[in-house]
Amino acid sequence: MEFLERDENIRYFEVLYNPDLTEGRGYFKKVYVAIEVYSNHKLYLMWYADQFLGKTIALVQGCAPVSNYILKGSTKAEWDYPFANGKAYTPEVYKKVFISNRGNLEGFPKLTKLKGMEFVKLVGD
C-alpha cells in the first residue's frame, strides 16, 4: 500500500549522455532516473545531470558545440523494462538512479549520500 501512496509523486526520466565527439552522431550511454519529491522534479533532474554528467556542452572535434546530455520524460514501463522498446542499450551502457526525499522504497535502488543529500543511489557503478 505504501508504494501506491508514494507512486503519485514519482516521475520518470531518461537521460542520453556521452555524445560521439568524433562525428557527432548520437549518444553512447543512457540513464533512467526516477525522482520522488513533492515538486520540482525537473530541477532535481538538472541537478543530478550537473553533478554526474558534467558540463552541458561538449565540442565535436574540438570546435562544434553539442549538448553533453539530453533530458527526456519517460514512463514506469521503460524504467521497469528498459529493453522492451527494442533499443540496443545493454546493461553496460545504461544505469538507473533513484532520487527521493522520503527514504527507501521497495523495488527501487537503496539510497545513499550524494554531495550533502542523503537520498540518491547510483546503480550500475
Image: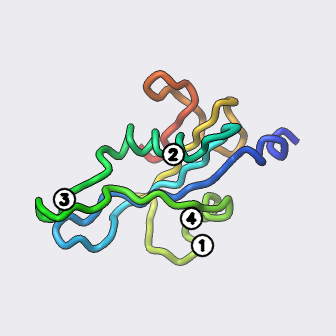
Type of amino acid at the residue the image marks with label 2: Leu
Q: Decide which of tag 2 and tag 1 comes sooner along the chain.
A: 2
Q: Nearer the viewer, mark 3 or mark 4?
A: 3
Q: How far apart are marks 3 and 4 (CA)?
A: 29 Å
Q: Mark 1 points at which residue?
A: 84
Q: Distance between the residues labelled 1 and 4?
A: 6 Å
Q: Mark 4 points at which residue?
A: 82
Quadrant of image for the N terminus: top right
Numbered mark located on residue 45 in the image: 2
Type of amino acid at the residue the image marks with label 4: Pro
Disc 1 secondary structure class: loop
Q: Is residue 33 left or right of residue 50?
A: right
Residue at figure coordinates x 12%, y 64% from the top left: 61
Residue at figure coordinates x 38%, y 37% from the top left: 51
Q: Image quadrant of residue 19? A: bottom left
Does residue 62 lie above or below 3 as drawn? below
Q: In this view, does 104 lie to the left or right of 86?
A: right
Q: Decide which of tag 3 and tag 4 comes sooner along the chain.
A: 3
Type of amino acid at the residue the image marks with label 1: Ala
Nearer to the camera, 32 or 106? 32
Does residue 25 lie above or below 80 as drawn? below
Type of amino acid at the residue the image marks with label 3: Leu
Does residue 25 lie above or below 48 as drawn? below
Q: Distance between the residues labelled 2 and 1?
A: 24 Å
Q: How crowded is mark 1: few (under 14 residues within 10 Å), some or many (20 or more)?
A: few
Marks 1,4: beta carbons within 8 A: yes
Q: Name the residue under label 3.
A: 59
Image position, residue 109 (x, y; %): 60, 41
Disc 4 secondary structure class: loop
